[in-house]
Amino acid sequence: MEVTDIARLATTMASTSTAQAVNVAVMKKAMDIQASSAAALLQALPPVTPATNLPPHLGQNINTTA
């Protein structure tokens, strides 16, 4: 290998490493934004009110047939 080849390889490796670091940082930021958006959507849901005319045991069993 010549000196120029070694310099080119070192430059390519450095730029690849920088590009990967930027991609990881962008992905982490996108995940943070998505998590905060999901939390905001969950907080925006209206509170659940229990049904007053249903029996308390409803939904505790699963009926199956063979």
Image: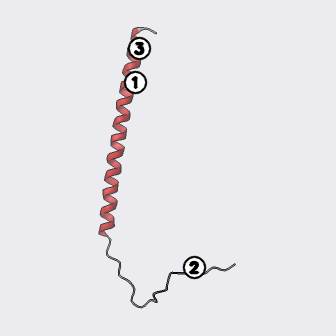
Q: Position of residue 65 (x, y in %)?
A: 66, 80
Q: Amino acid at mark 1?
A: Met
Q: Residue furthest right?
A: 66
Q: Amino acid at mark 2?
A: Ile
Q: Residue furthest bottom?
A: 53
Above or below: residue 34 compared with residue 44: above
Which of the numbered marks, if any, corresponds to residue 13? 1
> Dot 2: what SS?
loop
Q: How does the figure colour the protein chain or chains?
A: secondary structure
Q: Position of residue 46 (x, y in %)?
A: 31, 74
Identify the residue position indicated by label 2 in the image: 62
> Dot 3: what SS?
helix
If the image is split into quadrants, where does the C terminus sit?
bottom right
> Dot 1: what SS?
helix
Rounded to the nearest angstrom, the CA distance separating label 3 from label 1 is 10 Å
- Disc 3 + disc 2, Cβ < 8 Å: no
Give the mark nearer the N terminus: 3 vs 2.
3
Q: Position of residue 2 (x, y in %)?
A: 43, 8
Identify the residue position indicated by label 3 in the image: 6
User: Residue at image x 32%, y 62%?
Assistant: 39
Label 1 CA crowd tier, 10 Å (few <14, some 14–19, many 20+): few
Residue 24's quadrant in the figure?
top left
Name the foreground residue: 57 vs 11: 57
Q: Position of residue 43 (x, y in %)?
A: 30, 67
Left of 1 or right of it: where is 39? left
Rounded to the nearest angstrom, the CA distance separating label 2 from label 1 is 59 Å
Q: Amino acid at mark 3?
A: Ile
Label 3 CA crowd tier, 10 Å (few <14, some 14–19, many 20+): few
